[in-house]
Amino acid sequence: MQALPGFRDFLPSDCAARNYIFARWRDVARRCGFVEWDGPVLEPTDLYQKKSGPEIVTQLFNFTDKGEREVAMRPELTPTLARVVAAHEREFRKPLKWFSIGQFFRYEKQQRGRLREHFQLNCDIIGETALAADIELVALCIDIVRAFGFTEKDFVVRISDREFWTEFLRSQKVAPERWDEILQVIDKFGREPREKTTEKLGQLADPVLRILSEGGKSEKLDQLVDGLRARGLADFVDVDVRVVRGLAYYTGIVFEVFDRAGKFRAIAGGGRYDNLIEQLSDGAVSIPALGFAMGDVVLGELIRETASAREAMQKATAAEQKIDIYIVIAKEERRADALAQIQKLRDRGYRVDYPLAPDKVAKQFQTAEQLGAGIAILFGDEWPQVKVKTLATREEVLVLHDEIITRVANLL
RNA sequence: GUGGUCGUAGCUCAAUGGUAGAGCCCCAGAUUGUGGUUCUGGUUGUUGCGGGUUCGAGUCCCGUCGGCCACCCCA
């Protein structure tokens, strides 16, 4: 038996890496004033079918439950967020700055960096129309990637604005019903043959291709970059109007994070979705919002393939997995005394381990070493004294058992 | 979902169509209370699974499942 395709087992080292990622996500988000929340892993399929665009539906991990309900494992958090905010927004002062770390699912053939399950950080700002919110969100996104040891040489945030395109389409007198379709074509630009793009755009082909090749400019995008420059983050961003993102609900600024080498899929992506909450609440609550998501899979790959980031992670996870004290029971008749001390040490907050079954002293020291213990305490013939050994220096001192705590406090 | 490619021990990989191996890991020892090194010994495989060709298949053919890559799509 093995795990289902696209689902991962997390062995201790994998879990350590995962916790390392979560810890940095959480730390930076909290540092920026975001508070953590979460929603259900299972949602009504309708939640996604209605508002996320038709593409998403074919890739849902969905089924009919025993109550004949059509349900789906959540593929993303934003629809849930919109629902929750619509229901509870009056309980909070605006703007809300919320983040969440959770597992998400999709049903599609897996590939590298693309599984059927992954963990994602979501950060959203709700109830603020000012561009300052967009700047804050992009800055947070940059700070989070930086927290893993990456620099402007390692990654870039490509920023665009859907309004840039909607204004263009309005100026070209294109019917609003066709906007989403044309944005999809722009999104695919570069992944599709040029002739196919031209054909789909029809008479819009010339102006659109001109913008795509010359690059677009807008006052809003300039202001956004200025805001980031004021924070010293301008080197992390590139304005690139080719970015529109696949989801239909985005209304303004959109952005994606890529590794500079272009080797991986997007590390993160997001944007403004000012109408989504109103749509999902059937017009009951109208409140602007924006957010981004960052997955653990691509980020983890980038960490493992970047020497500095990899070493930082290894150092942190090694330290996290180490224990403080290993208890060596040299004489089984001292086991009860050892356990009494173990309990005391653990109550003091030390990480303490010991052999569950009788074992040779040599083997016990080997185990102590392997577990990364700072010190070993040997219980044996010296009782009521014990030997406290600093493993790194091999120095050993005899202390009375009721002085262990103070001695240990000095050594660790 | 479509196409290509690969699948051998827990891991990394060997083996002209002719008896399935190595290293690492793990376990146990080196006269019984001291760890990173060393030495000795040991466990582990229906060669992913199921058919077929052949005197004989890990090796060739077909199917299937799984991994990887490209497409599709991207939250």
Image (tube, coloured by chain):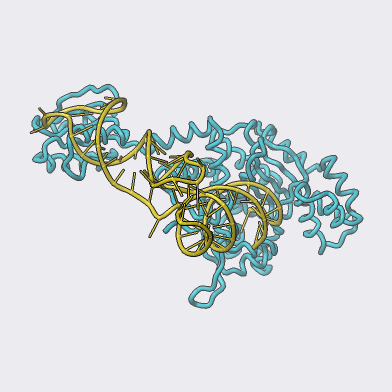
Chain colours: A cyan, B yellow
Front residue of A199/A76: it is A199
Image x and y of residue A72, in percent = 56, 66
Asked if residue A283 lies left or right of residue B24, the reply is right
Answer with the quarter of the image where residue A80 lies.
bottom right
Image x and y of residue A206, in percent = 90, 49
Q: Could you tell me if residue A310 is visible in this image?
A: yes
Say which residue appears at 54% left-offset and 37% top-offset.
A303
Say which residue appears at 11% left-offset and 40% top-offset.
A332
Residue furthest bottom in the image: A68
Answer with the quarter of the image where residue A343 lies.
top left
Front residue of A25/A150: it is A150
Q: Could you tell me if residue A274 is visible in this image?
A: no
Image x and y of residue A184, in percent = 76, 56
Asked if residue A274 lies left or right of residue B8, the reply is right
| Above or below: residue A204 compared with residue A59 | above
Image x and y of residue A305, in percent = 55, 36
